[in-house]
Amino acid sequence: MIPLSWYLWLGLALFAVGLFGFLARRNVIVMLLSIEIMLNAANTVLAALGTRMQDVTGHILVFFVMAVAAAEAAIGLSLVVLLYKRFREVHMDEVRTLKG
Amino acid sequence: MEKVLFGYLALAILLSALFAIFSRNVVRSVLWLLVLFLHQSVLFLTLQAEFLAAIQIIVYAGAVLVLFLFVVYLINLREEIRLPKFLGSYPLAFIAVLSMLILAVAGLVGFVPAKTVGSLSPGAILKVGHTQILGEHLFREHILAFEIAGVLLLVAVLGAVVLVRRLREGEL
């Protein structure tokens, strides 16, 4: 039996990696990938708690997180394509129309 | 034995996430993320969640990553190799991650799990299977959320089509 806390620590470490990638990378596509990493960390923790607490709600929540992640990836990537069409650029620090 | 397996999975997941974040080539990042998703699905198997392991591979590795790869190939990133990877202000990101870690570790050290609920007991999983238990609860208690998720996916598909369609002169 793997202890529950191991899964929680793994989820925390994975979330930290994803958060760093989201905050630090310039490329929008890698930022979206980092969001997927963070969602995976949350999924790990939800599935572990669901199994160990013998509660099916945790696993159902993982199911919905996956659906929302797929929707988010579709919209986010179409925004990336729009950004590239408009500015020929996918780097966050080069797109500064709002900054004036 | 299973602790060794967990150690390998945790190491592989963390390393592939780090490689995905730190690799300069975006195609390589996407492929490292594929490695992460496959290991994650084995991690779901160690939690007796075989349905989640299956949809992890089908949805993430099969659909989302293919979408990412398509967009990476649509966009010309030839100069990417020579450009800096990180924002100029990336030390601030370290501070943000560190403060998040401090808060989360403070919460996790004193963590005590709640009592078991019993709707997903190991005996029931062995007897009728994880998928059937999940389906019964999904379609009895969470049917509204399920329908809303369906509408959300439809809206996302339509939104993606509307966003990237080609505009003719005079439209919009």
Image (cartoon, helix red, strand yellow):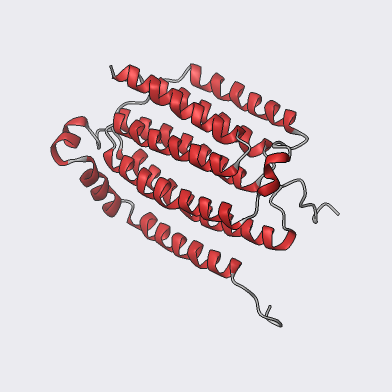
Question: Which residue does the image show at 45% across and 35% down from the upper left?
Answer: B36
Question: Which residue does the image show at 21% across and 46% down from the upper left?
Answer: B132
**Which quadrant would the C terminus of chain B be assigned to in this image?**
bottom right
**Quarter-wise, where is residue A82 in the image?**
bottom right
Question: Which residue does the image show at 73% across and 32% down from the upper left?
Answer: B90
- Depth check: give the residue in front, B143 or B55: B55
**In this rendering, does residue B160 appear at all?**
yes
Q: Is residue B62 above or below residue B22?
A: below
Q: Is residue B102 left or right of residue B9?
A: right
Q: Is residue B84 left or right of residue B60?
A: right
- Depth check: give the residue in front, A58 or B2: B2
Image spot of residue B59 (x, y percent)? 39, 49
Image spot of residue B130 (x, y percent)? 23, 40
**In this rendering, does residue A8 appear at all?**
no
Question: What is the residue that sits farthest to the bottom in this orientation?
Answer: B170
**Quarter-wise, where is residue B92 in the image?**
top right
Q: Is residue B11 above or below residue B89?
A: above
Image spot of residue B38 (x, y percent)? 39, 37
Question: What is the residue that sits farthest to the left in this orientation?
Answer: B127
- Depth check: give the residue in front, B134 or A91: A91
**Which quadrant would the N terminus of chain B be assigned to in this image?**
top left
Question: What is the residue that sits farthest to the right in this orientation?
Answer: A100
Image spot of residue A20 (x, y percent)? 63, 32
Question: Which residue does the image show at 50% across and 61% down from the upper left?
Answer: B156
- Depth check: give the residue in front, A6 or A94: A94
